[in-house]
Amino acid sequence: MNLKCHHFITSQHLLTVSYREGFLWKRGRDNGQFLSRKFVLSEREGALKYFNKNDAKEPKAIMKIEHLNATFQPAKIGNPHGLQITYLKDNSTRNIFVYHEDGKEIVDWFNAIRAARFHYLQVAFPGASDVDLVPKLSRNYLKEGYMEKTGPKQTEGFKKRWFTMDDRRLMYFKDPLDAFARGEVFIGSKENSYKVLEGLPPSTQGNHWQHGITIVTPDRKFLFACETENDQLEWITTFQKVISRPMLPQEYAVEAHFKHKP
């Protein structure tokens, strides 16, 4: 079954899914093995939970619907029915990778998460129309791929990392299937002194891929290097789209959190 061709729910198809439970194959955080885990989606509790054992009283994780996202990732997960679920834990992004042998089952889970998000948003934004809410139900990443990065002192060597641009969060991982990002960068708007530049400062040290990108934030510069000119162009285009978009009120709170990270 090709999930990309499947017709997913729009506003008129958002059925009431107040509760759903079942088993999904979940990738282990440390060993990378996929093991069967019980998942429970409860709108009443406002959360998606999973349990390490069938008879466990306490869930291994509680993912609030408020911060939940789901996106199909068959290539990354290595399964045609692979789903990446993300949520915020201590204000940092946590990834969970799952799949089900049955394509319809994983699509039903995806749609149930979207329906739960829809009902949450209806309460959170009572004046908003369904048309405004539907794009917020789930989001695909703006771009993913490898770049090289250096540290804040810009004297450390460049290291190859997997990057994910999720709305205004640029996250980097040692491996695409890591549970937690090694770091996150908030990308604001040009009105707030964020900009992207082609190339690296002349003083940049160390061996690195030749196609550089500099992101300027109010606090510091972030230096990245791409393997190909095409990669560089795609990343710059992605960053420019985000930076050219005015910030929403709730995004200022996210930005403030990033500034106060230890």
Image (tube, rainbow, N blue to C red):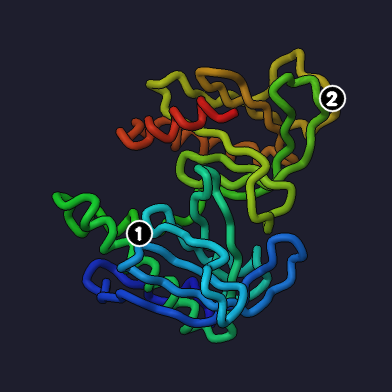
Quadrant of res 35: bottom right
Relative to 64, is 184 on the left or the right?
Answer: right
Q: Is residue 261 visible?
A: yes
Quadrant of res 163: top right
Q: Percent from the top left, x then y, of residue 84?
A: 55, 63
Q: Percent from the top left, x then y, of residue 224?
A: 68, 31
The amino acid pointed to by label 1 is Leu
Relative to 10, is 160 on the left or the right?
Answer: right
Seen at 43% across and 35% down, the residue is 254
- Alpha carbon of mark 2 to alpha carbon of mark 1: how far? 43 Å
Q: Nearer the viewer, mark 2 or mark 1?
A: 1
Q: Percent from the top left, x then y, of residue 19?
A: 35, 76
Seen at 70% across and 16% down, the residue is 201
Disc 2 packing (10 Å; few <14; some 14–19; many ≥20) = few
The mark found on residue 194 in the picture is none
Residue holding disc 2:
206
The C terminus: image quadrant: top right
The amino acid pointed to by label 2 is Gly
Relative to 98, is 146 on the left or the right?
Answer: right
Above or below: residue 259 compared with residue 139: above
Residue holding disc 1:
137
Q: Are marks 2 and 1 in contact (CB under 8 Å)?
A: no
Disc 1 packing (10 Å; few <14; some 14–19; many ≥20) = many
Relative to 96, is 8 on the left or the right?
Answer: left
- Residue that protrudes farthest toward the left in the picture: 127
Seen at 26% across and 75% down, the residue is 16
